[in-house]
Image (spheres, rainbow, N blue to C red):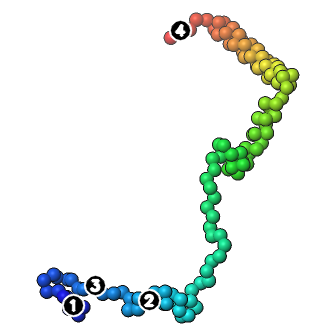
Amino acid sequence: GTYEESAKFKSGFNLPRAFMTNADLTRIINSDEVQSVLKPMVTGPTLVIPKKRNPLRRADVKAALNPYQTAIREREVKKATADKATKAKVLAAKRGVLKARSKEFAGRRKAFYKSASAEGPVSF
């Protein structure tokens, strides 16, 4: 085949045609007509994607994800640095509350058992 007509022995085949009539691409790009239409060249940094940082290892990243984390951390540090006397005092107060609660429930258990025994044996 030629540029004007397709091939006789190969259906649908035409010789490849050049896309550009003027192949001097640098002259075209640098011409005044093209440069007047283009946007000005960007100088300086473009979009910066921040590096992924592990919040389990970096306290500042963890605080950015969870603002309450700083209060939790301060409380943990305060608890860890508390002296033995303070810890013993807090533990004694906690045990006192639990002991009073335990006595209350023991009283309830005894009262229930007494009332259930007074009713007599259970029959079905």
Q: Amino acid at mark 2?
A: Asp
Q: Amino acid at mark 3?
A: Pro
Q: Quadrant of residue 71?
A: top right
Residue occupied by mark 3 = 16
**Dot 4 lies on which element?**
loop
Residue occupied by mark 2 = 24
Q: Residue at x 56, y 89 (%)?
A: 35
Residue occupied by mark 1 = 2
Q: Nearer the viewer, mark 4 or mark 3?
A: 3
Q: Are marks 2 and 3 in contact (CB under 8 Å)?
A: no
Q: Position of residue 93 (x, y in %)?
A: 83, 22
Residue occupied by mark 4 = 123
Q: Amino acid at mark 4?
A: Ser
Q: Position of residue 115 (x, y in %)?
A: 68, 10
**Above/below status of 103 relative to 5:** above
Between 48 and 119, which is closer to the camera in this rendering?
Answer: 48
Q: Quadrant of residue 90?
A: top right
**Above/below status of 50 relative to 72:** below
Whole-angstrom CA distance, mark 4 to mark 2, is: 109 Å
